Image (cartoon, rainbow, N blue to C red):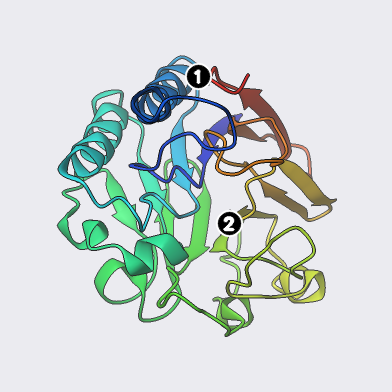
Amino acid sequence: MTTLALISDLHIGAPVKGVDLPAEQAQADAYQAITNMKVAVLNSGADAVLCAGDIFDRHNPSPQALQTAEDLFASFADAHLPAALIGGNHDAESPLPARLRLPGSAQWIGQGELGRSGPGTLVWEQFGIAIHGQSVRRRNETQDLASGYPRPVKGMWNLGLLHTSLTGYWSHRDCAPTTLETLEASCYDCWVLGHVHRPMVVETHPLIAYPGSVHLHRTGEPGGEGFALLHLTNQDVPQVEFYHVWTSDT
């Protein structure tokens, strides 16, 4: 069995919101949530990491945010966990992704700088996995990026990595909207989605899931902040588990 840790919507630099906290504590708790998630992933038994975008928050492009992201991916590299990542709409607005120094074991998925020029595929031969993905290119991405994703690689698990509002039902802001029919037509085994902060399974076959956000970002947002584990076994359908990490809103 191969297990992948799924992380998304880290919004590194943004404070915890939606709870009555002093500004300094809200900022400190948000960074602590990232640390708690990192430790939990490192102790989860995961073999690799997928990140579905919004690594940074567009409102807070601080040196601390950049250093925290670099430390996060360096810690995965030190633990021999390869990482694949795409950028979300917040990353498209932030100057930090272009400054992010990634270890050799972490790669942007997609064509061109930061994976923004078009979809691409990363093959992890050691796991028998092909990851297809593309970063969001602009703040208001209205194009259906999923419709242009590559064909599946035969004989491998095929995973789609996409930052999307999907149909818009669960999101207050459209981003690379697409449909379940488009995702199903790809013939991938699984889609890992970012942008919607609620952790949930949208569909089971193929598996289409949002790992959710790491900490609370607005009042009334559903709970469950943390990450997910994706299990790839000899069974036909991948399985996902959601994990909650401590934050000030728990």
Q: Gap in Å between the C-alphas at discs 2 and 1?
A: 25 Å
State whether residue 112 is above or below residue 30.
Answer: below
Crowd class of label 1 (few under 14; some 14 to 19; many from 20; radius 10 Å): few
State whether residue 1 is above or below residue 62.
Answer: above
Task: Kindly identify the residue that appears in the image at 19 percent across and 52 percent down.
Answer: 100
Task: Kindly identify the residue that appears in the image at 28 percent across and 77 percent down.
Answer: 112
Mark positioned earlier in the residue sequence (2 or 1): 1
State whether residue 166 is above or below residue 241.
Answer: below
Q: 116 or 92, which is in the foreground?
A: 92
Q: Of tags 2 and 1, which is closer to the observer?
A: 2
> Residue 168's x, y, as percent?
74, 68
Crowd class of label 2 (few under 14; some 14 to 19; many from 20; radius 10 Å): many
For the C terminus, give its image quadrant.
top right
Residue 156 showing in the rendered view: no
Position of 208 compared to 57: left or right?
right
> Residue 114's x, y, as percent?
29, 67
Kindly identify which residue carries mark 2: 195
State whether residue 166 is above or below residue 232.
Answer: below
> Residue 244's x, y, as percent?
62, 23
Task: Kindly identify the residue that appears in the image at 40 percent across and 53 percent down.
Answer: 85
Position of 249 compared to 60: left or right?
right
Residue 45, labelled with which disc? 1
Q: 28 or 244, which is in the foreground?
A: 28
Disc tally is 2
Q: 184 or 73, which is in the foreground?
A: 73
Q: Secondary structure at mark 2?
A: loop
Q: Secondary structure at mark 1?
A: loop
Residue 203 showing in the rendered view: yes
For the N terminus, give its image quadrant.
top right
User: What amino acid is at disc 1?
Assistant: Gly
